[in-house]
Structures are given as C-alpha cells and as structure tokens.
Image (spheres, rainbow, N blue to C red):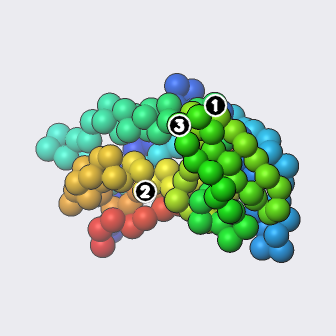
Amino acid sequence: MPESYEIRIRKDALKFAASHMTVFPDGTKESLHGHNYVPSLTVRVRDASFESTIPFSRLKAGMKRIALAWDEKVLVATRNPFYEPLRLDDQEVEFRLCGKRYVLPVDEVVRLDTDNISCETLARTYFDLLEAELGTELHADNILSVAVYIEETPGQGAAFERVMSP
C-alpha cells in the first residue's frame, strides 16, 4: 500500500495581523475589520529517508517573509469587480470598493492580485507567494502535495492544496 508522511508547520512567530473587507457577489461587503491570522503549511511527502529530508528552516523563512509583508496592513484585492483604483503615489493609495472611497497611507496597504480577501483567497495567494519564493524546493520529486491553511479565528479558516506529483 502507498505510504506518505506529512510535514506540518504552524508557529506563533508566523502569525500576522491584517485588516480586510470581504466583498460579496451582490456588491455588498463587510466593514473594514481585522484578524490575527494563523497560517499553517502541510507538505505531504512519499519518503522520509535521510536523502529526502526537507529543511524546515527554508519553509519557515518563506512563511515568515509573507507574515512580515502582511502584518499590520490593510489587504486589498485589486481584481475585485467592485474595486476601482483612483490614485497611487508615494504617500497614499486611494480607491473605491463597493462605492465607498478609501484613502490610506501607501505603506499600510498590501494590494493583492486576487478577486477577494477571504480565507480561501488568502490561502491561495499565500501558497502562490510561497511557491514563487521557494521555487523548485516545492516541486521536488518527493513532494506529493502542499497545502496552506489560513485560520482567521480559532477553529475557523480555509485551505488551499495543490497536488504536486502523481
């Protein structure tokens, strides 16, 4: 029978606090609010032998860079159909979301190339950033799948998983 192992990383040092507004298909949205997000990474491997060892430090370093980039920021989805960019300069970002106008300091906003800011889309965006940073390390022959889980409150979150190898 096929066997596999799971590497799981979830540490307090990798948390990030961020604000967001989830938009709904009817053009309504949540008010601007924040969460203390806790990301988890699960890497399923077919082999745990010495030759196939994956250094946790590289995975954690990639996760830490994302946490630092998103911590204490307002996350904005730039591909949302109800998002309208108005102005972006060295000092401020101005946009409309669902008809409401926002002006924020540019250094306090992270504009994400996604259509919404929800746990599901954050899990996918987080995975994409981690994959871009770690490159071939997440595509090693030994890796079966990689999953990112984003918890927004204890017991509530969403995951994105990609099967890497058959």
Secondary structure beneath label 3? loop
In three-dimensional space, the C-alpha distance between marks 2 and 3, rounded to whole angstroms, equals 27 Å
**Label 3: how many Cα within 10 Å (few below 14, some 14–19, many 20+):** few
Residue that badge 2 annotates:
128
Residue that badge 3 annotates:
90
- Which one is in front, 103 or 44? 103
Question: What's under tag 3, amino acid-wise?
Answer: Asp
- Horizontal and vertical percent for residue 120? 62, 59
Sequence order check, earlier mark of 3 and 1: 1
Residue that badge 1 annotates:
72
Query: Which circle, 2 or 3, is nearer the viewer?
Result: 3
In three-dimensional space, the C-alpha distance between marks 3 and 1, rounded to whole angstroms, equals 19 Å
Secondary structure beneath label 2? helix
Secondary structure beneath label 1? loop
Q: Looking at the image, can residue 65 be seen?
A: yes
Sequence order check, earlier mark of 2 and 1: 1
Query: Which circle, 3 or 1, is nearer the viewer?
Result: 3
- Horizontal and vertical percent for residue 102? 76, 47
Q: Residue at x 75, y 59 (%)?
A: 97
Residue 146 in the image: above or below residue 153: below
**Residue 123 falls left or right of residue 2:** right
In three-dimensional space, the C-alpha distance between marks 2 and 1, rounded to whole angstroms, equals 21 Å
Quadrant of the rendering where the C terminus is positioned = bottom left
Q: Looking at the image, can residue 16 be seen?
A: no
**Label 1: how many Cα within 10 Å (few below 14, some 14–19, many 20+):** some
